[in-house]
Image: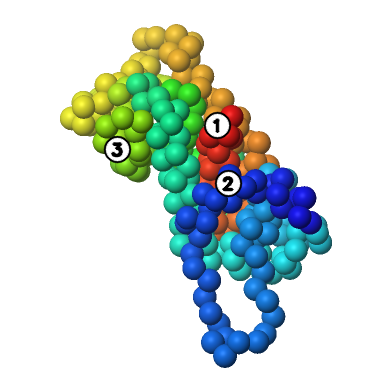
């Protein structure tokens, strides 16, 4: 069990996670009772579920705590937005090392089928079947800076403003913290004048493909990084299809996937 936990949660990731994990709640002040399962073992179980795509009941016995305990802690940490804070901490480390390139960012989305639950809708690209959509904004290297989820029937253009606003203040190698891209690249799904005006007011240059005027291939020479990040997200098999009925749990797995992508760059 120790080898599996250390492989899924290396020491570098565990040190960063300890900065955001909520403090342990003392349920029995008088002492006694069963020993609380370790947070590192629980984190390893979350990563195993995210990357393998298995259900909670299919967790291997060597994972340590029971699947009921793992699920309860996952729900507790998801409500506390632990995964968003972990993603931010890793981005801070990358920014301090100069690994984030703000000069040219890209935005895109990806849809997948979903079961019943909030933030789902008929997918226009999948014969109207229920689905959800992941919206993401990446830096020039393809590292996710901002994430969001919605129903599959939500237009891509509606996700641009929330994603740009959702970029947190991130450390820089020199100077103050930063949250504003130098330039934003987008495909024809974001071809609206009000979005261009909104970006200009915030001092963000834009390069958005125009419908019926230019081909997507020309801009694709620079936007391919966000397409590659979409494939990296698909490396977490739990995101191939949305099984979570609660939107916060689905967003949690998206946050775990983004944190793992950024952490790989941190330990490169």
Of the residues under marks 1 and 2, which one precedes in the sequence? 2
Residue 174 at what x, y percent from top left? 31, 30
SS of the residue at dot 3? loop
Q: Residue at x 65, y 46 (%)?
A: 10
Labelled pair 1, 2 in contact (Cβ < 8 Å): no
The image's mark for residue 182 is: none
Q: Residues within 10 Å of mark 1 (few under 14, many from 20)?
A: few
Labelled pair 1, 3 in contact (Cβ < 8 Å): no
Q: State the separation of the CA atoms marked 2 and 3.
A: 23 Å
Labelled pair 2, 3 in contact (Cβ < 8 Å): no
Note whether residue 166 is visible.
yes
Q: Residues within 10 Å of mark 3 (few under 14, many from 20)?
A: some
Note whether residue 121 is visible.
no
SS of the residue at dot 1? helix
Vertically, is 177 above or below 29? above
Q: State the separation of the CA atoms marked 1 and 3.
A: 20 Å
Q: Residue at x 68, y 59 (%)?
A: 41
The image's mark for residue 265 is: 1
Residue behind mark 2? 13
Vertically, is 92 above or below 140? below
Q: Residue at x 53, y 79 (%)?
A: 26
Q: Is 265 or 58 nearer to us in this picture?
A: 265
Q: Is residue 132 left or right of residue 191?
A: right
Q: Residues within 10 Å of mark 2 (few under 14, many from 20)?
A: many
Residue 227 at what x, y percent from top left? 53, 25
Q: Is residue 30 left or right of residue 188?
A: right
What colour scheme has been applied to the protein in the rendered image?
A: rainbow
Vertically, is 123 above or below 174? below
Residue 16 at what x, y percent from top left? 51, 49
Q: State the separation of the CA atoms marked 1 and 2.
A: 12 Å
Residue behind mark 3? 177
Q: Which corner quadrant holds the C terminus?
A: top right
């Amino acid at each position: 069990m120790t080898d599996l936990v250390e492989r899924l949660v290396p020491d570098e990731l565990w040190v960063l996670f300890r900065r955001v994990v909520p403090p342990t709640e003392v349920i029995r002040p008088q002492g006694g009772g069963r020993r609380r399962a370790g947070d590192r073992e629980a984190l390893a179980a979350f990563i195993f579920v995210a990357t393998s795509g298995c259900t909670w009941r299919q967790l291997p016995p060597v994972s340590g705590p029971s699947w009921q305990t793992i699920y309860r802690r996952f729900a507790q940490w998801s409500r506390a937005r632990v995964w968003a804070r972990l993603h931010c901490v890793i981005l801070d480390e990358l920014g301090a090392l100069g690994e984030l390139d703000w000069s040219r960012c890209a935005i895109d989305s990806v849809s997948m089928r979903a079961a019943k639950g909030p933030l789902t809708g008929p997918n226009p690209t999948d014969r109207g079947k229920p689905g959800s959509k992941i919206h993401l904004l990446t830096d020039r290297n393809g590292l996710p800076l901002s994430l969001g989820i919605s129903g599959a029937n939500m237009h891509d253009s509606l996700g641009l403003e929330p994603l740009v606003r959702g970029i947190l203040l991130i450390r820089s190698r020199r100077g103050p913290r930063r949250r504003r891209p130098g330039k934003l690249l987008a495909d024809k799904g974001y071809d609206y004048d009000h979005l261009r005006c909104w970006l200009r007011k915030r001092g963000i240059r834009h390069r958005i493909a125009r419908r019926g005027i230019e081909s997507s291939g020309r801009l694709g020479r620079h936007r391919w990084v966000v397409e590659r990040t979409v494939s990296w997200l698909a490396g977490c098999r739990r995101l191939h299809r949305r099984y979570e009925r609660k939107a916060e749990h689905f967003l949690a797995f998206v946050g775990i996937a983004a944190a793992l992508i950024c952490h790989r760059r941190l330990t490169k």
